[in-house]
Amino acid sequence: MPSIIVPIDLGRRPQQLLERVARLISSVKDTRYELVIGHADRRMTSDESIQALVRTESGGNVVLVSEPFKTGASNMARVRNMAVKCATKSVVLLLDVDIYPDLQLFDGLTEAVVQGAPLSMAPCLYLTQKGTALIAHGGKKAILESYFGFSPEFVLHLATPSSVMAFKRDDYWKIGGFFEGYQGHGYEDFDFMLRLALEKSLVNPCPDLLVDKNYRAPLLAEGFRGELANLSLENLVDRNFAFHMFHNKDQQEHYYQSRVQNALLFNKRVSEFILYTPQNNSKLTAPNLVINFYAQCYRRGIDPARFYALFDARPRYMLKKKSLLQRVARGLKSVLGKIERNR
């Protein structure tokens, strides 16, 4: 069993995070998992609550690693490094506290590494409020069927690559752990997974890694996201998904605004990783994600058509309109059926 590493900073939405920590502790209690929570202690009432929660609710396999943090931006990289230093298992599994605790998924990711995979990464479905309510009641199958049926009802988007991943603890320190120069939201996880993938020769050190481009269709991702998404293809084709529970975002928060500076730092560091020079621009290549996806499907005898929703690049507002029209059509069909039966 692995050491599950979860960072937490209760400076934002503390009550919701405490509830999700409690759910995770309850899920792994009395199992062979080791749960190590890296805690940025801001000396608030909520910080006292999480300490009390671990003391009273854990079954002895939960460790809380707290370090005083001054007010200011979160540093999830530092908090993760704190936690991994206290991990005792040979396999590490990275989680976010908002990830739904699916022990079947965790077992699969761990087993892949035990069997020799350099890492095992789960694609992550970000849920709507409805999806979050459904997953809590065993609705994983219904969510997947809805998502692959092109419905936006339960899923906001699919994140691939994602930082829900298992690997050897020794490899974590071999690449120096998380780089602690990132503040607030974003890019510290891309930085880590890219360095790990380069160390394990899972991606090529090419100029494509400097392309920072968001995507709508997961299988049409480009740049470093497209390269890293290849790492999750095996679990994607096997439908081994992580589920990220819904929470509100205030884009005006400094936590999210820091993403711009983090992106610049990431680009600078990637340039150093791949020894990039501007003359290498001509070596940009077409994404190989689609080719690798079809290869994974054919290798397993799986029909690629089961995943065509992953090629859907329509903006979300178009999906919502379609969904509304479908509901109206169903309603009209029902009314017409009643009229026909009452004739």
Image (cartoon, grey):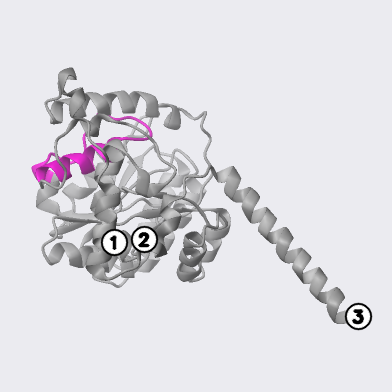
Residue 126 image offset from top left, x and y in percent? 45, 52
| Front residue of this view, candidates 330 and 50 | 330
Tags 1 and 3 in contact by the CB under 8 Å rule?
no
> The disc labelled 1 sits on which kind of residue?
Asn
The residue segment tinted magenta is 173-199
Q: Residue at x 20, y 62 (%)?
A: 2
Residue 151 image offset from top left, x and y in percent? 55, 58
Q: Which residue is drawn at 77% across and 71% down?
A: 334
Which numbered mark, 1 or 3, is in the foreground of this view? 3
Q: Which residue is drawn at 25% across and 29% down?
A: 210
* Rendering quarter of residue 184: top left
Q: Classify mark 3: helix, strand or loop.
A: loop
Residue 337 image offset from top left, x and y in percent? 80, 75
| Front residue of this view, candidates 198 and 341 | 341
User: Which quadrant: the C terminus?
Assistant: bottom right
Residue 156 in the magenta stretch? The answer is no
Q: Classify mark 2: helix, strand or loop.
A: loop
Tags 2 and 1 in contact by the CB under 8 Å rule?
yes
Could you tell which of marks 1 and 3 lies nearer the N-terminus? 1
Tell me if residue 33 can be seen. no
Classify mark 2: residues with Cα within 10 Å, few (<14), some (14-19) or many (20+). Answer: many
* Rendering quarter of residue 80: top left
> The disc labelled 2 sits on which kind of residue?
Phe
Q: Which residue is drawn at 32% across and 59% down?
A: 236
Name the residue that disc number 1 marks. Answer: 235
CA separation in Å, label 1 and label 3: 53 Å
Give the numbered dot on residue 343.
3
Name the residue that disc number 2 marks. Answer: 241
Could you tell which of marks 3 and 2 lies nearer the N-terminus? 2
Residue 175 in the magenta stretch? The answer is yes
- Residue 16 relative to residue 224: left or right: right
